[in-house]
Amino acid sequence: MIAPNSPETMLEAGGAAKGVAVALVCDNRDPDGLGRVKVSYPWHSQENQSYWARIAAPMAGSHRGVYFLPEIDDEVLVVFDRGDVRFPYVIGALWNGKDWPPETNSDGKNDIRVVKSRKGHRLTFDDGAKGMVRLDLNDGKKLQIDDDGIKLEDVAGNSLTIESNGGTLSIKAATKLTISAPSVEISATAQMKVDGGGFLALKGGMININ
């Protein structure tokens, strides 16, 4: 027999509940496009879904804000509007023994902050001694900004490096580097060096070497 004041009874009757509750996202396709989700409750029948629940975001406004919509089956924490279980608000997401965080604080320094998508795209902030921000795409492309400079690279071996200390810009291509524009000008205030390991060709309507 279910107790009169149990969560199950209150949910079915639209009663009042104090505090917060753990829930699972069961629908995230809001027909009104308001960024809401429906949830079910592990402590209740999975078939009993909530009404559309609004999500408490770090910032929200007219066509602006922080948009992170929970995935289906994500575990979330909900609170009820004035205790009414018919109107939940999602106030946070939870990791658990099945869904693990994308990073662990194994060294106890807590230097790493991470935003990671389900496809594996990852944005990392490292507050360690050198400091670093890195964007990793799931296909291997990387963009890293740190105290030494900026480096962009891909899995094919192409890279672009800007060194902060030496003032050097390096471009490395695995097979071919092409620069194309209606007008191209290369100028050096001191020394300029062109070195080809093989054949060197210059072609133009007119070539003036001074």
Image: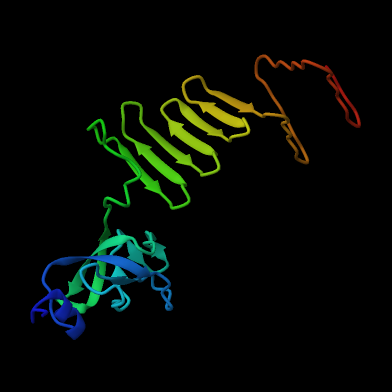
Residue 118, placed above or below residue 190:
below
> Which of the colour schemes (rainbow, by chain, secondary structure, one colour) is used?
rainbow
Residue placed at 42% from the left, 67% from the top? 63
The x and y percentages for residue 20 are 16, 66
* Quadrant in the rendering for residue 193: top right
Q: How many marks?
A: 0
Quarter occupied by the C terminus = top right
Q: Hey, which quadrant is residue 84 in on the image? A: bottom left
* Point 32% across, 52% down: residue: 99
Of 8 and 16, nearer the camera is 8
Using residue 92 as the reference point, say whether residue 142 is left or right of it: right
Q: Position of residue 198 (x, y in %)?
A: 81, 16
Outermost residue toward the front in this view: 1
Residue 90: quarter of image: bottom left
Residue drawn at the location 29% of the way across and 60% of the way down = 75
Q: Position of residue 203 (x, y in %)?
A: 88, 28
**Relative to residue 42, is residue 74 drawn left or right?**
right
Up the image or down, 182 lies above or below 164; here it is: below
View extreme (bottom): residue: 13
Residue 157 position in % (x across, y down): 62, 30
In the image, 191 versus 2, the foreground residue is 2
Q: Which residue is at the far left?
A: 4
- Please report the residue visible at 39 percent of the width from the left and 33 percent of the height from the top: 132
The answer to which of 190 and 12 lies nearer the viewer is 12
Q: Quadrant of the N terminus?
A: bottom left
**Horizontal side of residue 3 vs 100, given as left or right:** left
